[in-house]
Image (cartoon, rainbow, N blue to C red):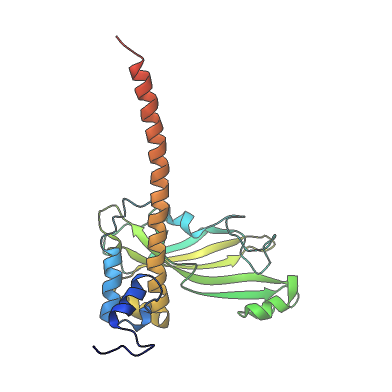
Amino acid sequence: MALVSEGLKTQAQEMLEFALGQKRICFGELSETEGDRLLESALKDVNLRELRGFKPLRNLLTFRPNSIIYGREQPHTLDVEVLDLSAEVDFSTQGFDEGSSITLDDYAISVCRGKTKGKVIFKRSETDEETSDYREASSWGRSAYHYKGSGEILAIRRPRNHTRANENLIVIEVQYEKVPHKNCHLITSIVLKPLSLGDDFRKHFGPLYPRIAVELIWELGSIYRNTSKELASQQCLIDRKVMELERVSEALSY
C-alpha cells in the first residue's frame, strides 16, 4: 500500500477540515457561475413573509441618539449622532417595473454591514477647510466636524406580492448633510434601484463583490437567527396563555 507523504493531505482529509470549519473557502476564488449559484441558493427559498426585522424605509435609513455604539462615552464631532429625513427629501426610484408604486413606507431590511459604498466630507470650522481623509480631520481636533456625505445600502425589499428574496434585492443611495449649529444630519436625497443576481450584482460592486456577497449570506443568517429568537419568545407567551386558559376551563362547569 502506498503511504501518504508526511504533510500531504488526501482530498477526503481536506473536505473533512472544511466540514469541521477548520478551513474556509475564499468566495473570490469561486468561478462566476459558482458564486452566482451560491447566492441564488441562499436567497431563492427565503419567504420574506416569515422573517422579522423589516422596517419602513424611512426608519431603516434614520437613527437617533444612542442607537449606535461608538466605543466611547460621547460621540466625536466626526461621527453622525442623529440622522433624520429632510422635510424636502428628494425620493425617487430607478429601474423598477412600470406601474410599481414604491414609497418610504415600503418595508425593507438591510443585508450589509454598514454602507457598501460611501464618501464623507469633513470640515474645519475655523478655516472652512474640507477633506475626505479621516486621519487628517482627526488632526484638526474638536474644530473638525462631519459635514456631509453619501452612501449606499444593500437591502431586501418586502413587496406586497409573494416573490422571494432573490427577486427583491435593492440598493439604496442616500445623500445627507449637517444641520448648521445642531448635532443632526438630514438625508436630502434617496434613490432606490433593483439589483439582480449575476452580472448586474458583480458589475455593480466590482472588486467589492466577494466581500459583499459573503456579508449578504452572513446577514441573512443573522436575520433568521433573530427571527427564531422572536418566535421562540412569542411561543413561550402563547404556551403560558394556553396553560392559564386550560386551568380556568377545568375549574368551570355549566
Q: State the residue lying farthest toward the top.
A: 254
Q: Position of residue 52 (x, y in %)?
A: 39, 51
Asked where in the image residue 171 lies, by quadrant, the reply is bottom left
At 68% across and 81% down in the image, what residue appears? Answer: 136
At 42% across and 47% down in the image, what residue appears? Answer: 230
Q: Position of residue 27 (x, y in %)?
A: 36, 78
Relative to 20, is 48 above or below? above
Say whether residue 175 is left or right of residue 138. left
Query: The C terminus appears in which quarter of the rendering?
Result: top left
Q: Looking at this view, is 237 or 172 the one in front? A: 237
Say whether residue 106 is left or right of residue 64. left
> Taking the image as drawn, is residue 76 in sight?
yes
Relative to 193, is 69 above or below? above
Asked where in the image residue 75 lies, by quadrant, the reply is bottom right
> Taking the image as drawn, is residue 53 in sight?
no
At 50% across and 67% down in the image, what residue appears? Answer: 114
Query: The N terminus appears in which quarter of the rendering?
Result: bottom left
Asked where in the image residue 73 lies, by quadrant, the reply is bottom right
